[in-house]
């Protein structure tokens, strides 16, 4: 979707069902598939670690450890401006789940959001500015982390240490090393941690991946991820707070807020900075626009990109890191505070030679792979030559190319995956093969195959009730593996050269300069610990 659409989801659409299967049959099949896939090692899944090593702190015993099938689950949402409200609304709709607390350093957001959630669950959540107080609340079973990327790891690790289960947004971390620490924390404290790659819970995407893993297009040797998402330039603004028009914050998802002394009096900006270096306030480094500054964000390759990286890695069936990565690009457009590129190409080579490509285009661009309608057009015209001009005109308007999505290439054919619609083509003539046919949208908030992110929220709650992290569609281990890909691309981009990665040890090969970029300098006391 276009960046200025006002919608809060990263790109995805309603999942489709497979024609000819009833809903019940379909659910049964996808469940069997998921179980089979985990057994076959197709989905990333690690055995639960309940053993705590001697000498290290034990997990705090809270209600979170013993959630019964019928117990009410209390959740706190941490970061409630944008994505956090999607989470709050989604979880509040699930029966027997209550949003107990909304937490944000920006208290200006609270009144409207409390009212909204109260309207859904008929209980007004408490509000809290300091996330550490949330972790101290023994009644809270799980927290969601919808914070800027530089806060994800620390918030998640603190939550695990306090005995909470966690739903952490993508990208799961701001850098590679802290992502590994997150995996260790989930394991060490025996917590259930879902990463916010919601495509994993869309049945149509699951079907597409199963088709690939079953050899549907032959041996998949290359995956491509596209992030063609035009973004408005953020311009340049002065540091500080003020009342003039130059201080009026305006981004695509906000109609304009003046960050004056009154507004900022209700904001804990030092806590917003957290692990990042202390700097004066600047609205281009605050709500949402932080994505384009390296101290807090990872550019669009690390924003929308991780969703398509996750699908690309899943489709390629790679549960290992690539060995060689190369990325280039730049920021093109008017003078701007943006540090991250708005145009970025990246290639990844795996040990067996398989390839992943990623393409970010943040300005205006064509779409890609619009072959489906070209075939349909010629077939329709052939069937009814008299209707040709009108049909050609109509179908030309409806060119069905990808702007944000994936392409997979195999030895027999290729797959198109655009939102949750997938199609396959075979041979020299691009003969259409199996594809998704029908869209399926679920209005039931407790349905694990619901549209958008709802199924992913429901899946998290189901895993809390079963107590088994194997029931998660995207455990932190999988989230970490996929998140590592944009981080590797950014390291190559920032160094301006190809990097060689030793995935087993998660270090670069004889490359101290690149190794330094595996982590960051943390501002105390907001340091991600070396040992969790
Ligand atoms: N899965 C998806 O489809 C999806 C969609 C959008 C965003 N996201 C992810 O969600 C995260 C949040 O994105 P957003 O667009 O909502 O960002 P945002 O900047 O609009 O909102 C982040 C909120 O976190 C608050 N915050 C910052 N530091 C805090 C702290 N220490 N304690 C409490 N609150 C704090 C901010 O005040 C702000 O209200 C990002 O990591 C993004 O990648 C995921």
Image (spheres, helix red, strand yellow):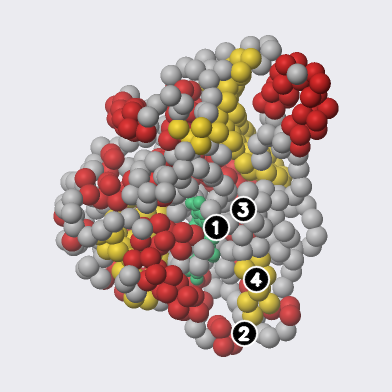
Image position, residue 490 (x, y; %) = 60, 47
> In the rendering, which numbered label is found on residue 260?
2
| Residue 372 seen | yes
Which numbered mark, 1 or 3, is in the foreground of this view? 1
Q: Which residue is mark 4?
A: 255
In the rendered image, residue 469, in percent from the top left (x then y), is placed at 27, 43
Per the image, the residue denoted by label 3 is: 299
Residue at 22% in and 60% down: 72
Q: Looking at the image, is mark 3 or mark 2 earlier in the sequence?
A: 2
Instruction: Please say if 437 is above or below 514.
Output: above
Q: Nearer the viewer, mark 1 or mark 2?
A: 1
Please count the marks in the image.
4
Q: Nearer the viewer, mark 3 or mark 2?
A: 2
At x 69% / y 23%, what residue is drawn? Answer: 376
- Secondary-structure class at tag 1: loop
Cβ of disc 1 within 8 Å of ligand 1?
A: yes
Q: Residue furthest bottom?
A: 262
Dot 1, crowdedness within 10 Å: few (<14), some or many (≥20)?
some
**Residue sitting farthest toward the top:** 428
Estimate how packed mark 2 is, as few (under 14), some (14 to 19) or many (20 or more) residues with alpha carbons within 10 Å: some
Asked if the residue at label 4 sits under 8 Å from ligand 1, the reply is no
| Quarter of the figure that contains the C terminus | bottom left
Near mark 3 (Cα within 10 A), the count class, few <14, some 14-19 or many ≥20, is many
């Amino acid at each position: 979707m276009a960046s200025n659409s006002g919608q809060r989801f990263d790109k995805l659409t309603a999942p489709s069902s497979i024609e000819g299967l009833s809903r019940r049959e379909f659910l049964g099949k996808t469940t069997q598939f998921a179980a089979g896939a985990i057994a076959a090692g197709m989905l990333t899944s690690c055995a639960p670690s309940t053993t705590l090593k001697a000498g290290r702190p034990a997990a705090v015993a809270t209600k979170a450890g013993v959630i019964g099938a019928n117990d009410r689950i209390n959740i706190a949402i941490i970061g409630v401006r944008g994505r956090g409200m999607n989470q709050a609304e989604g979880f509040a709709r699930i029966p027997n789940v209550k949003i107990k607390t909304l937490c944000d350093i920006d208290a200006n957001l609270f009144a409207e959001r409390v009212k909204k959630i109260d309207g859904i669950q008929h209980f007004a959540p408490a509000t809290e500015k300091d996330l550490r107080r949330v972790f101290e609340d023994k009644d809270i079973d799980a927290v969601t982390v919808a914070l800027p990327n530089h806060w994800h790891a620390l918030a998640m690790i603190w939550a695990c240490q306090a005995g909470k289960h966690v739903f952490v947004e993508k990208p799961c971390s701001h850098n590679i090393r802290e992502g590994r620490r997150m995996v260790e924390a989930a394991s060490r404290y025996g917590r259930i941690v879902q990463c916010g790659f919601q495509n994993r819970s869309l049945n149509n995407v699951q079907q597409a991946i199963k088709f690939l893993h079953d050899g549907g297009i032959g041996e998949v040797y290359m995956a491509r991820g596209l992030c063609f998402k035009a973004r408005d330039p953020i311009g340049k603004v002065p540091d500080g707070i003020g009342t003039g028009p130059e201080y009026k914050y305006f981004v695509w998802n906000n109609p304009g807020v003046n960050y004056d002394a009154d507004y900022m009096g209700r904001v804990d900006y030092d806590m917003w900075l957290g692990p990042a270096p202390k700097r004066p306030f600047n609205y281009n480094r605050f709500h949402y626009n932080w994505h384009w500054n390296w101290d807090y964000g990872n550019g669009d390759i690390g924003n929308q990109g991780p969703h398509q990286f996750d699908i690309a890695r899943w489709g390629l069936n790679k549960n290992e890191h690539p060995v060689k990565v190369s990325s280039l690009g730049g920021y093109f457009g008017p003078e701007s505070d943006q540090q991250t590129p708005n145009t970025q190409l990246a290639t990844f080579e795996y040990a067996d030679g398989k390839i992943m490509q990623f393409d970010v285009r943040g300005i205006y661009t064509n779409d890609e792979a619009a072959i489906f309608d070209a075939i349909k057009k010629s077939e329709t015209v052939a069937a009814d030559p008299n209707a040709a001009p009108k049909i050609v005109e109509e179908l030309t308007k409806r060119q069905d190319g990808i702007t944000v999505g994936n392409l997979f290439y195999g030895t027999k054919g290729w797959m198109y995956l655009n939102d949750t619609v997938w199609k396959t083509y075979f041979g020299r003539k691009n003969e259409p093969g199996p594809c998704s046919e029908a869209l399926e949208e679920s209005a039931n908030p407790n349905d694990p195959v619901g549209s958008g992110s709802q199924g992913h929220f429901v899946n998290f709650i189901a895993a809390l009730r079963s107590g088994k992290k194997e029931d998660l569609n995207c455990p932190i281990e999988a989230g970490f593996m996929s998140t590592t890909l944009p981080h590797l691309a950014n390291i190559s981009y920032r160094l301006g050269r190809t990097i060689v990665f030793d995935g087993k040890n998660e270090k670069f090969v004889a490359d101290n300069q690149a190794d330094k970029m595996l982590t960051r300098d943390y501002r105390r006391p907001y340091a991600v610990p070396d040992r969790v």
